[in-house]
Image (cartoon, rainbow, N blue to C red):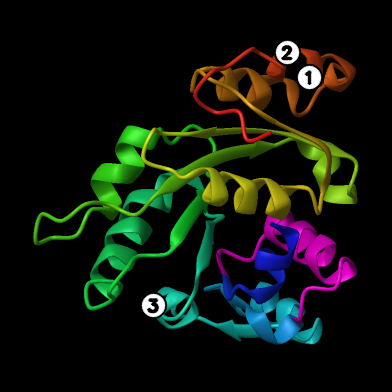
Amino acid sequence: MASQLHKSKIAFIGGGNMAAAIIGGLTAKGIDKQNIFVSEPWDVNRNKMAETGVHTTASNAEASRDADLVILAVKPQVAQGVCRELAGAWAGRPAAPLVVSIAAGITLGSLRQWLAPENGGAPPHIVRVMPNTPALVGEGASGLYAGDDVADAEKELAAALLSSVSKATEWVDREELLDVVTGLSGTSCVPYLVPLLSVPSTNTDTH
């Protein structure tokens, strides 16, 4: 699935520190910068991103228009508005992109509601991810959670994305475990993270 990641057009909605870390990890693994698009409203952050050689814009719709994979990397307080904007921008697409959310605390249910097309169609497939603070320097551990509608190939794509900044990527079978990851992310408890995430699961195993 790493090969599929190399073929994908990847859009980051938000160009903050975690987005920058993931982009750095992706390009270090050989992902073509011309396949990475970043929307960022703040000029300073956008200019920093542009200096790395990726495409940048202030428009969420423009960044994600042709994307295969969209990483929602915005602050929780603006997530609803951004998601509704994206839902409108994707209305004419034959298929919505896979969405990977790193917005802390925003549940899968909320994301589905906000990203659902206004015409009542199905929302895009969504994976929630919680990379912890060491991911900023490529030393992280990431917990991932997806609903039943997400295919194994999509889960593998999301895991490949996060492996660019994580030494361990583990699927959890209960969404609330991602909140535990959030609590550990800024502490010295990181060594205990992977055993916590390694919860047996029958519906999220990609191996």
**Mark 1 and mark 2: Cα distance apart in space:** 5 Å
Which residues make up the magenta segment? 11-32
Label annotation for residue 196: 2
Residue bearing mark 3: 61
The residue tagged with tag 2: helix, strand or loop?
helix
For the point 65% across and 66% down, the residue is: 4
Marks 1 and 2 close (CB-CB < 8 Å): yes
For the point 13% across and 60% down, the residue is: 118
For the point 68% across and 45% down, the residue is: 159
User: Residue at the left extreme?
Assistant: 119
Marks 2 and 3 close (CB-CB < 8 Å): no
Label 1 or label 3, whichever comes before in sequence order: 3
Q: Can residue 161 be seen by looking at this rendering? A: yes
Q: Check disc 2 and give the amino acid type.
A: Leu
Label 2 or label 3, whichever comes before in sequence order: 3
Q: Check disc 3 and give the amino acid type.
A: Ala
